[in-house]
């Protein structure tokens, strides 16, 4: 059945909550209002106020209490209203959730999924547009999931909820209503740590994750008309990372363009590039190229500035074309 | 409400006293081990024993959770941790049940004993207690979660967020402040502009109770009342147990830099072990023979733990990468 990315989030939550009574959702405005993006719309009506709760406006409390609830047998799926607002909870996510299994020698675990809408292009300005994945991908003990399509949303969200470890599930706000796709009714899981080739190609490999996978696919389609064959690898999860899939596509085309919306410097593209340089340098026919958000503190508000920040299909197309011609 | 001192039979009182003695003897031995160069760092419960032991005894141990901080040696002993466990932890041995030798001493944790694993960043644990209580409430279990923390922790944002969250959601949680007057070297008057931590409860619409933290009976009654309130669905309680730490913050600290010897000597007049011993003698529950027998028993347990941990194996370096993520049982 065709649905939007946002509907895929909501319907997966609904399906999982029907299946597993341990799942609870809470956060700011997720109850009566169904979330500021409506990701949880109708869920409180169906599952009641005990399982879908409006919480006080405090991100550290939302995550910190979810840790305790997870340890005491529930499966919390807390929502951070905007990924940009996650920073008050970093201590609880990084120092606590991510380290609890390790520090207790495997005796405690924190099975929870923190959902957070990320990314720009929706006139959200500096504090409603950020891509935050690089901060968290650095932390062993966490998993970071960034789906690009409604189909992947469903399989990855269900797998994240079933996972025994803390997962940061980043949903792109621009994708919520603009990206549609077929989603089967029945339940299925996509294992965390498995990338997918979203488009086969032979001249250039684009490696991306989240919303920019969709932009990369558009660019690839345009380039195909001009005879450039582009492969698009969607990492889907950046921790755990499918290093084999990255090296395979790099070796196949010999030309790699890494694309992400997050700022360039220290972005996760650096890690992908380093992996390829370490393990597949002599299979390359061109230097690895990164296309990313510029090194400015965040995405500005005015449409002209916002557009200038964004990694658009046009920019990707130009970069891939240049690389193909190298 | 049930009588809050119900259950304080002579046997229970003597058991409480034994755990206080055991904690002190164990604590003293840890310092010896440190000065011998056998334990890199020590954090003590020395002075806090009445608060810690009595609060544990007031809970439904084995069923309720405690969410401790590093000061809580006597608390975890009262919850069922053994001297051997403590020494394996102190010496970073492979069989340390708290962390398998991964964490510094006094970073407690045991699934079986319902002691939540602890980190070093103070006050995060208050949120975990609220979360445990949230799950208990949603599962309709009569479980109470008790977080402990120093008065320095009350300056943290997590203190406010946890109390507010637990109060709004009427969670079965107890927030037990062990106020010893110092956050390492910083006195309480530089930490807060109110004389009592408990006064802050007003801001959350929950009861705030001050108790003499050197009197185990008073602490027991306060925690027992808070637990009853929690189980009745009436929400959390903030308890402030006023006490004192007789030793430096850790074996790396020198408290002469920030408090006078006279002040410490004065505080020792209210040493909870001395106060409770007198009480038990007055009640004719304890005489010299029993007292000596109790000390001998504690010393024997500590000797055994020292010897046991001394020869216990270190963690295998090949295990460094384990338990980053869940390991499927094959």
Image: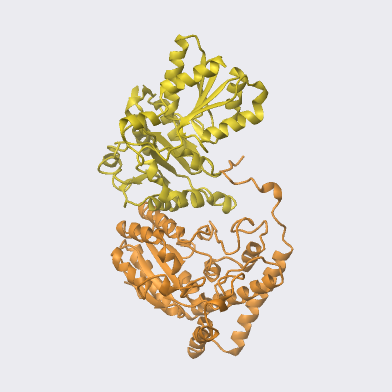
Chain colours: A yellow, B orange
Residue A105 falls left or right of residue A230: right
Picture quadrant where residue B83 is located: bottom right
Drawn side of residue A160 relative to residue B109, left or right: left
Camera-side residue of A95 and B129? A95
Question: In the current view of this chain or complex, which residue is farthest to the right?
Answer: B311
Residue A166, percent across and down? 48, 44
Please state the horizontal and vertical placement of residue B243, each as a whole percent of the image.
Answer: 46, 77
In the picture, the quarter occupied by the N terminus of chain A is top left
Relative to A237, say whether B11 is above or below: below
Q: Residue at x 29, y 44 (%)?
A: A29
In depth, the one of A103 and B96 nearer the eye is A103
- Residue B157 visible to an observer of this rendering: yes
Percent position of residue A146, x then y: 45, 33
Question: Image point 32% across, 51% down: which residue?
Answer: A57
| Vertical comparison of B138 with A307: above or below | below
Task: Count the labels in the image.
Answer: 0
Residue B227 is drawn in which quadrant?
A: bottom left
At a point 41% along the width and 22% down the height, the residue shown is: A313
Q: Please state if A85 lies on the left or on the right of A46 as rendered.
A: right
**Which image quarter holds the C terminus of chain A?**
top right
Where's residue A288, x and y in %?
A: 58, 25
- Evaluate whether residue B301 shows in this view: no
């Amino acid at each position: 059945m065709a649905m939007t990315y946002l509907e895929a989030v909501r319907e997966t939550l609904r399906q999982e909550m029907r299946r597993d009574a341990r799942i609870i959702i809470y956060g700011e405005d997720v109850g009566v209002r169904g979330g500021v993006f409506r990701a949880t719309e109708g869920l409180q009506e169906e599952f009641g106020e005990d399982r879908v709760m409006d919480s006080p406006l405090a991100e550290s409390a939302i995550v910190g209490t979810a840790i305790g609830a997870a340890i005491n047998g529930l499966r919390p799926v807390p929502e951070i209203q905007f990924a940009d607002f996650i920073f008050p909870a970093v201590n609880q996510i990084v120092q606590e959730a991510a380290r609890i299994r390790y520090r207790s020698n495997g005796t405690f675990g924190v099975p929870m999924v923190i959902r957070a809408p990320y990314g720009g292009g929706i006139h959200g300005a500096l504090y409603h547009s950020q891509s935050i994945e690089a901060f968290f991908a650095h932390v062993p003990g966490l998993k970071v999931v960034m789906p690009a399509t409604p189909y992947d949303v469903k399989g990855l969200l269900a797998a994240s909820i079933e996972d025994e470890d803390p997962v940061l599930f980043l949903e792109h706000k621009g994708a919520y209503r603009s990206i549609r796709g077929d989603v089967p009714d029945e339940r299925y899981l996509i294992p965390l740590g498995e990338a997918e080739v979203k488009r086969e190609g032979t001249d250039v490999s684009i490696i991306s994750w989240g919303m920019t996978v969709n932009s990369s696919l558009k660019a690839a389609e345009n380039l195909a008309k001009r005879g450039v064959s582009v492969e698009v690898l969607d990492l889907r999860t950046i921790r755990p990372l499918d290093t084999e899939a990255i090296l395979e596509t790099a070796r196949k085309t010999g030309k790699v363009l890494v694309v992400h919306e997050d700022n360039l410097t220290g972005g996760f593209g650096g890690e992908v590039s380093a992996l390829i340089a370490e393990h597949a340098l002599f299979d390359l026919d061109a230097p690895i190229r990164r296309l990313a958000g510029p090194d400015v503190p965040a995405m500005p508000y005015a449409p002209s500035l916002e557009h200038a920040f964004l990694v658009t299909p046009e920019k990707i197309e130009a970069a891939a074309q240049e690389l193909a011609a190298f | 409400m049930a009588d809050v001192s119900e259950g304080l039979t002579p046997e229970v009182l003597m058991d409480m006293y034994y755990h206080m003695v055991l904690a002190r003897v164990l604590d003293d031995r840890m310092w010896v081990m440190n000065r011998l160069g056998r334990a890199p760092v020590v954090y003590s419960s020395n002075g806090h024993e009445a608060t810690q032991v009595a609060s544990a005894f007031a809970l439904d141990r084995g069923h309720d959770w405690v969410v401790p901080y590093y000061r809580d040696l006597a608390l975890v002993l009262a919850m069922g941790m053994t001297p051997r466990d403590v020494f394996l932890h102190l010496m970073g041995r492979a069989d340390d049940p708290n962390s398998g030798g991964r964490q510094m001493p006094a970073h407690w944790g045991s699934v079986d004993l319902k002691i939540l694993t602890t980190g070093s960043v103070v006050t995060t644990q208050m949120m975990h207690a609220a979360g445990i209580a949230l799950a208990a409430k949603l599962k309709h279990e009569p479980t109470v979660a008790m977080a402990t923390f120093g008065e320095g922790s009350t300056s943290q944002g997590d203190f406010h967020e946890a109390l507010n969250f637990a109060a709004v959601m009427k969670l079965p949680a107890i927030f037990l402040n062990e106020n010893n007057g110092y956050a390492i070297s910083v006195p309480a008057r530089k930490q807060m502009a109110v004389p009592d931590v408990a006064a802050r409860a007003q801001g959350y619409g929950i009861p705030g109770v001050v108790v003499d933290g050197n009197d185990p009976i008073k602490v027991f009654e306060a925690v027992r009342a808070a637990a009853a309130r929690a189980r009745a669905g009436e929400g959390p309680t903030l308890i402030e147990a006023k006490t004192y730490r007789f030793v430096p913050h850790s074996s790396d600290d020198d408290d002469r830099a920030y408090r006078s010897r006279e002040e410490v000597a004065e505080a020792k007049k209210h040493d909870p072990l001395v106060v409770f011993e007198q009480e038990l003698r007055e009640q004719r529950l304890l005489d010299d023979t029993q007292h000596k027998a109790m000390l001998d028993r504690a010393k024997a347990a500590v000797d055994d733990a020292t010897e046991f941990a001394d020869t216990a194996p270190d963690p295998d370096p090949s295990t460094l990468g384990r338990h980053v993520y869940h390991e499927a049982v094959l």
